[in-house]
Amino acid sequence: MSITPTKFIWMDGKLVPWDKAKVHVLTHTLHYGLGVFEGIRCYKTQKGSAVFRLRDHIKRLENSASVMGIKIPYSFEELVNAVKRVIKANKIGECYIRPIVYYGYGVMGLDPTGSPVNVAIAVWPWGTYLGEEGLKRGVRAMVSSWLRIDSRMLPPHSKTVANYTNSILAKLEAVKAGYDEAILLNIHGFVAEGPGENIFLVKDGVLITPPLSSSALGGITRDSIIKIAQDKGMPVREENVSRDQLYEADEAFFTGTAAEVTPIREIDGHTIGNGKMGKITGDLQHTFFEAVRGKVAKYISWLDYVE
Ligand code: PPE
């Protein structure tokens, strides 16, 4: 997916012009993958732009770093304010926000001690992750031959840069096979998630999603959808999902900051439901989009207004 440049990127406290936001080729994270990042979205609302669950994303960034033993040299509030500052500086209403914490130039070799911990925050307009059509009609997914990383190898709840090579292998395999997206099973054979999204099924009116112990990332969109569904009185179960349960589902969808709520219309050649966006998926997607745009009073606390 190509990037549309904006004007400034926040780098270690300074707003740096987009083209000058560069790092040395011996940046530690570039070689060994030890760094953590976030993906956040800002939406236009009637009261101006608002970042969706900003504090929850910064909390997860801090948790990701702490699991990996990385000390972020900025406080929670400094990071929250930095996100708002870079959005304002770029005069952008709706955008995707990418904070990254990385070990910079200083040492080589596996032990990063002695490398500075650098932080950058970029923002750019990012449309639908799995295509406009995908968001309306659903995407085609395949169960990957690659398994999702296990917590005895790499911590799946941390948005660590290196974790994403696992995701990329699954994504590339799916795309090469003619699918839009992958679904990864965990080392126990249960469904974990997509390479950059959580997954949900609907069966007999019940919303089902793999538990966090399945090696899925603790998605903030996942959490929002669970809350929205419960508020609608829908039964929600977090439980292990087997591969055949995917094929038997009445409805299925992915959730993520980038993917938002994207229906799945086919898995491994099996049509899900009637091959279109399911009714419950449509209802949850609608309420999610209303919530992020500040149109649902009970979810206003999820918004952090930029001004
Ligand atoms: N699982 C994974 C592995 C993941 O990367 C994401 C976000 C999610 C689940 C959903 O989490 P949340 O955004 O909090 O609902 N993936 C980010 C990166 C995507 C990318 O291609 O880069 C995102 O959606 O921003």
Image (cartoon, rainbow, N blue to C red):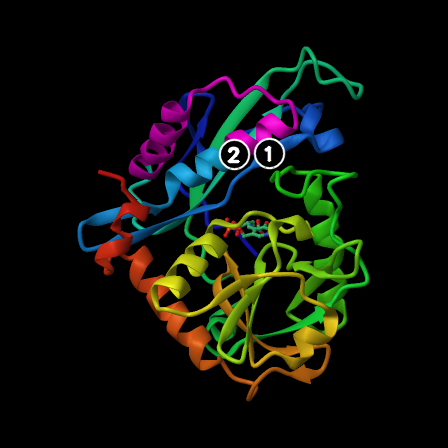
Mark 1 residue element: strand
Q: Quadrant of residue 35?
A: top right
In the picture, the quarter occupied by the N terminus is bottom right
Quadrant containing the C terminus is top left
Q: Which residue is mark 2?
A: 61
- Note whether 263 is above or below 74 in the view shown: below
Instruction: Answer left or right for 276 relative to 269.
Output: left
How would you rate the neighbour count of disc 1 (Cα within 10 Å): few for under 14, some for 14-19, many for 20 or more?
Answer: many
Q: Main secondary structure of the magenta part?
A: helix
Q: Which residue is mark 1?
A: 36
Residue 176 in view: yes
Q: Position of residue 169 (x, y in %)?
A: 76, 54
Q: Position of residue 271 (x, y in %)?
A: 64, 85
Residue at position x 29%, y 49% in the image = 93
Magenta stretch: includes residue 71: yes
Name the residue: 52% across, 50% down.
219
Residue type (three-letter) at the residue carrying disc 2: Leu
Residue stretch in magenta: 61-89
Dot 2 or dot 1: first in sequence order is: 1
Q: Are marks 2 and 1 in contact (CB under 8 Å)?
A: yes
- Amino acid of disc 1: Val
Secondary structure category for the residue under label 2: helix
